[in-house]
Image (cartoon, rainbow, N blue to C red):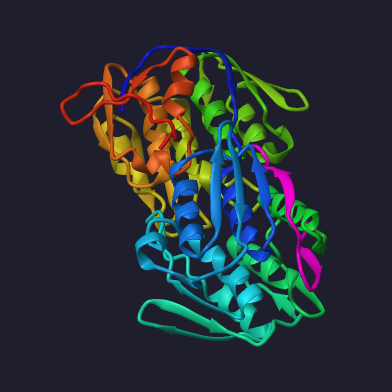
Amino acid sequence: MRIVGGRPLEGTVRISGAKNASLPDLCATLLTDQTVRLSNVPEVRDIRTLARLLSDLGACVRFEVGGIIEARAADITSVEAPYELVKTMRASVLVLGPLLARCGKARVSLPGGCAIGARPINLHLQALEKMGARIRVESGFVEAQCERLRGAEIYFDTVTVTGTENVMMAAALADGETVVRNAACEPEIGDLAELLNAMGARIQGAGGSTLRIEGVTSLRGAEHKVVPDRIETGTFIAACAIAGGDIEIRDCHPSHLRAVIEKIRETGVRIEEGPDNLRVRSPRAMKASSVSTLPYPGFPTDMQAQYMALMTQATGTSTLTETIFENRYMHVAELQRMGASVRVEGRTAIVTGAAPLSGAQVMATDLRASASLVLAGLAATGTTIVNRVYHLDRGYFRIDEKLRGLGADIERIDEKGGPVPAREDGA
């Protein structure tokens, strides 16, 4: 992407459905032989990848205009999730629980995705073993079998979003009651529970740290609207703050982003809340404010990189402490290329602002890091070229078009510098 900085943002932007809710929702369609219809699904690259995986497993997946997907797994013809697909997206591991619950077996490649840390799935496997699964890891695959899963008491040593989701889906078809303690509380967990309950599951406590799931013998088809993407919402708040301007963000859930809204308000940005919209107005100058990432409802790790870009333009010194992943500062070197004053000490990044940024050639290393470089480009003097934006396309639906609609000077370019037309699928 090519970005010419210095243009304030004005106008209205609509938030897409949450990628991190759509992915487990799609995996949940494997739990029934009936049709599940999802709306408000962002047609980003990760969704297309998972749809291909579901098709390989025997499901029929159909995309409709306007972010609607119909999926029906009438017959599951394969229980193997191959490395070629799983390596590009860690969320592919979410087929493990549904396949095991419905088919009694699964063979899933160990996951990949963004290179932001080890992110082991041992907690998933330990929980499924407590539910009666026999599991071994061999040649890079998780191989699991069971006659029928049974309810169990599950306690997660550390909060795991995908682990909670995998257990929820597996427990929905297990014999008896499953109790999950220290469960993840993210809004995406509540979204999955809403879908599963619409399919006939019996899940209580979603949004809290204890879940109770009473297993049923079968699930049915359902219709479900995916929750808005809170990280996209936060990214556009930060975009307006760093570029300057006055924007309205529609089709969002402000209550899902409380920690981000309050933290950015501390910098001097004015944010007014409605039931499903926000108005963001940037100040003449921002002041530095420190933050630590935490599991929900704390400040999300998926907003750390964007917030760091913002702090490069805030007066004073701020510290950002990353407590979730051990390798999530790869964007620092790229921000430094643009003139940012950032140094890393262990899990803490120390940012001194406001340092003038200048356009440069930079390289995206993961999904949220790529967003931080786009934000930095909006504030920089001159032209910024962000390479490897396929990372960005994994999680943001046409973010360049949305920013351009707000007045940003941004476009996709090919290797020769020419413009690239947007694809119909947004990927």
Q: Which residues are magenta?
A: 206-228
Query: How far across and how far down the image is residue 29, in percent?
Result: 64, 58
Q: Quadrant of the C terminus?
A: top left
* Residue located at (36% from left, 33% from top): 373
Query: How far across and how far down the image is residue 295, in percent?
Result: 63, 54
* Residue located at (66% from left, 72% from top): 156
Q: Determine which quarter of the picture holds residue 30.
A: bottom right
185 is higher (above) or lower (below) than 307 = below
274 and 145: which one is in front?
A: 145
422 is higher (above) or lower (below) than 293 = above
Magenta segment, prevailing SS (helix, strand or loop): loop
Q: Determine which quarter of the picture holds residue 262.
A: top right
Q: Determine which quarter of the picture holds residue 259.
A: top right
64 and 278: which one is in front?
A: 64
304 is higher (above) or lower (below) than 419 = below
Relative horizontal placement of residue 366, taking residue 126 as reference (left or right): left
Q: Can residue 173 be seen in the rendering of this structure?
A: yes
23 and 64: which one is in front?
A: 64
Relative horizontal placement of residue 100, taking residue 196 as reference (left or right): left
380 and 235: which one is in front?
A: 235
The residue furthest left is 416
Query: How far across and how far down the image is residue 123, in percent?
Result: 58, 74
Count of number-bearing discs: 0
Query: How far across and how far down the image is residue 28, in percent?
Result: 64, 59
Give yes or no for residue 152 being in the magenta stretch. no
Q: Can residue 207 be seen in the rendering of this structure?
A: no
Give yes or no for residue 220 being in the magenta stretch. yes
Q: Quadrant of the N terminus?
A: top left
